[in-house]
Image (cartoon, rainbow, N blue to C red):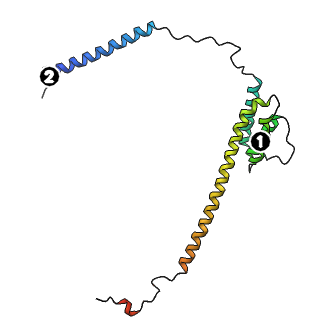
Amino acid sequence: MKPDGLACRPRWFLFCVLLLTGCAGLAERERVADEVPPPQCAPVDEAVRPSTSAPEEISLRAMLAYYGNNARAPAAAPRERPLPRDPYLLMQLAIQLGQARPPELARAQSALEAVQKSPHPSAAYLVPLARLLHEQYGERLRLEAQSRDAQRRQDQLQEKLDALSAIERSLPSPSTQRVPKGAQENPR
């Protein structure tokens, strides 16, 4: 059946009205956009802008690069030697200790604490990184302790399970038990 021409007209009429209403809204938006000027950015004062070659940024970038390079190929942990007073050397020592196999996190934390407490003027630039590494190493120590406790509990539970299995094996099985003839018969 062909649709009645009168029945399709309201649909077409509604479609055209909606189309024209949408186009009118676009024209209104374009007119408003032309009237509103784009926002202007305030000029940045050169004294306020951080210098990309500031010593603290260079030292921090160098320390992060050292951390990244040492993470790819960790060196052996340095053996006992007196702690240097230079905060950069302390940070490098802490990074080496933290990434050694196995890591010596307690010694690394003590080196990081020395950086945080250092009166050296360049240590102030390394304090945020030292604080971050100190927290990370502390968290690693806590997780290692939890892992050791969980392993100890798992071993204890396995021993108990093995003991229960041994007891169960030592019990006679029900099929090998002899039942007296009188007990087999069901009294009715």
Frontmost residue, 34 versus 47: 47
The amino acid type of the residue labelled 2 equals: Ala
**Left or right: 13 in relation to 49:** left
**Secondary structure at numbered mark 2:** helix
**Left or right: 18 in relation to 90:** left
- Residue at figure coordinates x 68%, y 42% from the top left: 136
Horizontal and vertical percent position of residue 75: 78, 45
**Is residue 185 in view from this perspective?**
yes
Frontmost residue, 63 versus 83: 83
**Toward which corner of the image does residue 1 lie, by quadrant?**
top left
Compared with 149, 97 (above or below) is above
**Is residue 74 in view from this perspective?**
no
Residue on which the image places disc 1? 94
Residue 16: give its label: none
- Residue at figure coordinates x 71%, y 14% from the top left: 47
Q: Earlier in the sequence, mark 1 or mark 2?
A: 2
Residue 7: give its label: 2
Please rate how many residues cluster around mark 1, counting C-alpha atoms within 10 Å: few if below 14, some from 14 to 19, many from 20.
many
The amino acid type of the residue labelled 1 equals: Ala
Frontmost residue, 64 versus 125: 125
**Secondary structure at numbered mark 1:** helix
